[in-house]
Amino acid sequence: MAIRVMAANRSASPGSRQPLLGFIAAFVCVFGGLSLLQGVGPTYTRAHAALGNALVGGQLASGTTLRFHTSDEQLARDPWHARLRVEPPAPERPLDVPIDVRSLLFLPTAAFLALAIAVPLRSLREHLRLIALGLSILEPLLLFLVATPLLSFLGGTGPVHALSLSRPTHVVLQVLYRALVAPPGMAFAIPLLVWWGLLAAFGRCELRRNANAAQKPPD
């Protein structure tokens, strides 16, 4: 499988390192191309604002209303920023929380896509399976990580107390935020782990299939 091939290339002679160099070059090209995209920004941001409203939009038990919103004027200035509108009961004033969709969601997703496309696999079908499974795991994880500071903010660390969270919950949310969201490079650790874990799982499945095939008696 790809993991074993790439690991072997690290200790091989310079002439046999072409697959690893090809993987690195393909990753840089794909990720660079995706990261430079600007035209998809408004559509991507609107889609995730709509998803946020479908998941958590509306009025909470505390009376606070949450709504993710974008506008054509706002997206013309910055196509990658959505805003969470927090409207507490009167007399408290509403506030907007900006969310950088590009840094928190799009670039980690682009990194995973680049890894999944660049890695040498046996067929296009395996690439598509890796992408489909990876995105189905990665997207909920990224959304959860984006939600961790928002939950803590709405639970009492911010000016609006919209949620009732226990002290241990606040601690867990803050630890997750400081470990996996706040450090700039950690945004790419999650897609890397998802990619590596799926490749390892694919490799184990292939080994089991080969072992079962070897145990079958000849016809």
Image (cartoon, rainbow, N blue to C red):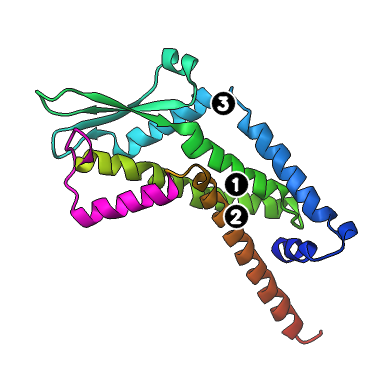
Quarter that holds the N terminus: bottom right
Read off the residue under disc 3: 40
The answer to whether 128 appears left or right of 181 in the picture is right
**Of the residues shown, which amino acid type is indicated by label 1?**
Phe
Q: Quadrant of residue 4?
A: bottom right
Tell me the residue at 46%/32% (across/down).
101
Query: Dot 3 surroundings within 10 Å: few (below 14), some, or many (20 or more)?
Result: few
The answer to whether 11 appears left or right of 206 in the picture is right
**Of the residues shown, which amino acid type is indicated by label 3?**
Val
The answer to whether 4 appears left or right of 111 in the picture is right
Farthest top residue in view? 73
Q: Are marks 1 and 2 in contact (CB under 8 Å)?
A: yes
Q: Is residue 176 magenta?
A: yes
Provide the secondary structure element on which disc 1 rests: helix
Tell me: residue 14, above or below residue 203: above
Tell me the residue at 23%/57% (across/down).
168
